[in-house]
Image (cartoon, rainbow, N blue to C red):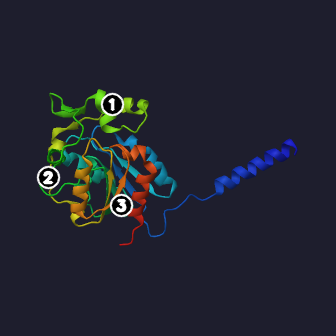
């Protein structure tokens, strides 16, 4: 093959690649996925799940709640839901479950997904649920000004034991502190009472007791999947977590 022929072949291959249409979400699926992170972390932890969903044709938005109060965090989530161009699957991890329990009342939200998350009923908070069935973790402590942190020395074991050490080290050093106002904010009108919900139990969770997760999800009638993983299951098992989210997006209603 001449140099010119080789260049022409490469150019044609590139043109064919660029002309390939992007994947679209399955027909009838809810295409808009809004992801909400929990305490002590930020939205970057959703990257692997977001990449999978995006490759499968979904439009993904990641909320960055300030964790200053439950009301503030619900408002931040509603702000992003309102930007969507149609129905939404709303997903929350950890404390993010308390957030989506409130924000899920937004008319655009059609289904909820709880990922190793709190799922409070009326009058319950993340803190009260955690006290009801304590987790294995004991590394959370408040700062003098009312924000919670995980002891960096305990972060890997308590939050993300199945992630590489360099990842957990960065997570421990870049914590997003959770205010006591967020931890003690109570649910007033749980969206899971009026909308379908899916849930994931992280069987090796040390930050939320897996038995508490099972209790909450059974109480709500959530379609529940158990995944072997730490509290950071959405990072360590992104394919399995994305599969549950897509199940929620494509279910007939």
Res. 82 in view: no
Disc 3 residue crowd, few under 14, some 14–19, many 20+, Cα 10 Å: many
Between marks 3 and 2 in the image, the one whose residue lies nearer the viewer: 2
Tell me, for residue 88, which label it has, or none: 3
State the SS at label 3.
strand
Q: Nearer the viewer, residue 90 or 114?
A: 114
State how far apart marks 2 and 1 are (Cα): 28 Å
Disc 2 residue crowd, few under 14, some 14–19, many 20+, Cα 10 Å: some
List x then y, in percent, for residue 37: 32, 45
Q: Left or right of 12: which side holds 149?
A: left
Tell me, for residue 124, which label it has, or none: 2
Outermost residue, left direction?
A: 123
Query: Label 1 near label 2: C-beta < 8 Å?
Result: no
Q: Residue at x 21, y 40 (%)?
A: 68
Residue 59 found in image quarter: bottom left
State how far apart marks 3 and 2 are (Cα): 25 Å
State the SS at label 2.
loop
Indicate which disc, 2 or 1, sits on the residue closer to the N terminus.
Answer: 2
Q: Nearer the viewer, residue 205 or 178?
A: 205
> How many marks do you count on the picture?
3
State the SS at label 1.
helix
Residue 3 found in image quarter: top right
Indicate which disc, 3 or 2, sits on the residue closer to the N terminus.
Answer: 3
Q: Residue at x 46, y 58 (%)?
A: 58
Q: Left or right of 177: which side holds 22?
A: right
Q: Residue at x 48, y 51 (%)?
A: 52
List x then y, in percent, for residue 35: 36, 51
Outermost residue, bottom direction?
A: 253
Res. 56 in view: yes
Instruction: Identify residue for label 1.
Output: 172
List x then y, in percent, for residue 64: 32, 43
């Amino acid at each position: 093959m001449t140099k010119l022929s080789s260049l022409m072949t490469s150019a044609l291959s590139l043109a064919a690649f660029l002309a390939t249409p992007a994947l679209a979400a399955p027909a009838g699926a809810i295409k808009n996925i809004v992801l909400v992170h929990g305490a002590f972390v930020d939205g970057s932890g959703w990257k692997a799940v977001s990449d999978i969903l995006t490759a499968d044709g979904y439009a993904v938005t990641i909320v960055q709640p300030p964790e200053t109060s439950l009301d503030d965090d619900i408002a931040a989530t509603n702000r992003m839901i309102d930007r969507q161009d149609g129905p939404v699957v709303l997903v929350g991890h950890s404390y993010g479950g308390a957030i989506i329990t409130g924000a899920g009342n937004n008319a655009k939200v059609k289904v909820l997904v709880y990922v190793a998350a709190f799922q409070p009923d009326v009058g319950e908070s993340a803190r009260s649920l955690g006290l009801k069935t304590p987790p294995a973790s004991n590394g959370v402590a408040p700062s003098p000004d009312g924000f919670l942190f995980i002891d960096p020395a305990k972060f890997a074991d308590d939050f993300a034991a199945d992630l590489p050490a360099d990842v957990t080290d960065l997570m421990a050093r870049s914590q997003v502190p959770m205010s006591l106002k967020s931890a003690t904010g109570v649910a007033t009108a749980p969206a899971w009472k009026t909308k379908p919900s899916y849930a994931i139990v992280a069987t090796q969770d040390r930050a939320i007791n897996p038995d508490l997760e099972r209790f909450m999800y059974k109480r709500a009638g959530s379609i529940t999947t158990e995944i072997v993983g730490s509290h950071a299951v959405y990072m360590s098992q992104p394919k399995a977590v994305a599969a549950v989210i897509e199940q929620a997006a494509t279910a007939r209603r």
